[in-house]
Amino acid sequence: MSMFFKKSDNVSLKPKNIVQPNYEDDEPEVDYDEGVTLLYKEIEEKNWERVISRLDTHPIEARAWIFRRESSNAHKIRWRLLPLHASCIFRSPLAVIEALVGAYADGAQMKDDQDMLPLHLACRNGASKGVVLTLLYAFPEALGIRDRKGRTPLDLVDASNSPNREAVMLSLIKYQQESDNEKNGRNLDGNATGSSAVVGKANEVDYEHRTILFRLILKKDWKNAAERSEDVPFEAATWIVTKGFHGNLKFLPLHKACVLQPPISIVQALCEAYPDGVNSKDQDGWIPLHCACFYGAGQEVVDYLLIANPNNANAKDDEGRMPLHYATLKAASEGVVSSLLRANPKAALSKDNEGRLPIHHACSKGAPNGVIEALLKVSPKGAQSKDDQGRVPLHHACRKKASDQVVETLLTIYPKGAQVKDDQDMLPIHYACKNGASLFVVNSLLKSYPESLDMKSR
């Protein structure tokens, strides 16, 4: 159901027909109750690949405002928004946001009927860091703009419960710091900033002029993309740089392919066309292996990237995270985790900038017992390690209602974990009871620390 409908609306939930916007208007207006553009219909139904295809053939529809009137007062607008706003509400993937911004870059500057920019909506609805940064680089001033309720994008992220909250918050704060430095006429190295654009360098093009190879990858046209990388290997070595502040959101075709859960064939083709691509870092310090682990690429892809350069399993990004951190953060399979551990066993002992080991992330994301056992086999002491919130992995497991087997495994390795209080004076059993853990889990925690029955949290 579209989130714009009230249960009391006595109308059909789907528009009756598809309309064509007036091609003579720069920003066409379309009444939802009389019909919508095909682009908007595909967004509402979350047909993301069709959205991208429609934008390729009918980019004008990215400029069409869709509005709906109040049923009780035809003169009053109930809501009004662009396809870019709607895509942020429906949490579309990054590729859709990129395609919409590419078709109508000014859309990032447009407010809906609630005075919300696409960036506001993305931040409120738990968009990924990539989506937020894409919108921000399209309209840098958005970071300081307030909606009708006086909230900035940063305020909306801070108030959200999204799993992306911490990563997005750090990115926005970092961006603000860079912006402040730029306004003071100095870059992060303390050198005076010049007027030359980053995009002018060799092997770099801006997003508007992205290569044919990159366009094929965005469409997931893997067969033709593989052929293109073989025929024009220069494009595999060409960085795509977004327009906007600093112009420093940049990535190779290999980075983008690894974001889109690619088949092994295109990864092989891109690596053969540009072998150094597997070692190349984007603006956040991500190599393609980080992208593959964060966005859920298959084990075959992860294994291939590790074979191309096993040392990349050691690579840390700007948040202090190795590929293993992202694999556990995104609930990767036991096979992927095992491959990363074989390539770099010490990754299990590495803390990120939040003081978390991979096992903290695994427990916080409900990883299966096989993953927990694989991490503890390499690093048993991980079970007693505290993160920056004073939590051991057992806290995270109990917060996320982990399985009986996971809790049993953690208690077997480190029984005293049941006695550890975090910075909120919470024991693991407090979280277990709060989040509806099984009777087995509660009894196991009590058996390990009977005194916890009388312990109060803050």
Image: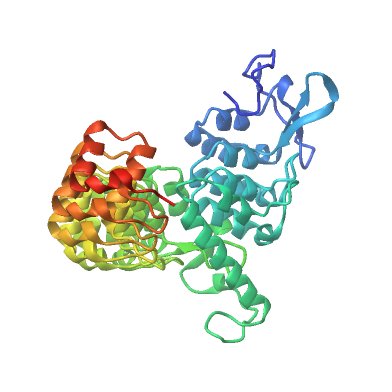
Left or right relative to 156: residue 323: left
Left or right relative to 16: residue 235: left
Residue 89 seen by the camera: yes
Is 386 placed above or below 88 here? Answer: below
Viewer-proximal residue, 127 or 262? Answer: 127
Is 209 placed above or below 10 here? Answer: below
View extreme (bottom): residue: 191
Residue 18 drawn at (x, y percent):
65, 22
Q: How is the image coloured?
A: rainbow
Residue 420 drawn at (x, y percent):
29, 56
Q: Quadrant of residue 57?
A: top right
Residue 428 drawn at (x, y percent):
31, 48
Viewer-proximal residue, 51 or 113? Answer: 113
Viewer-proximal residue, 151 or 397? Answer: 397
Viewer-proximal residue, 177 or 155? Answer: 155
Residue 127 drawn at (x, y percent):
52, 46
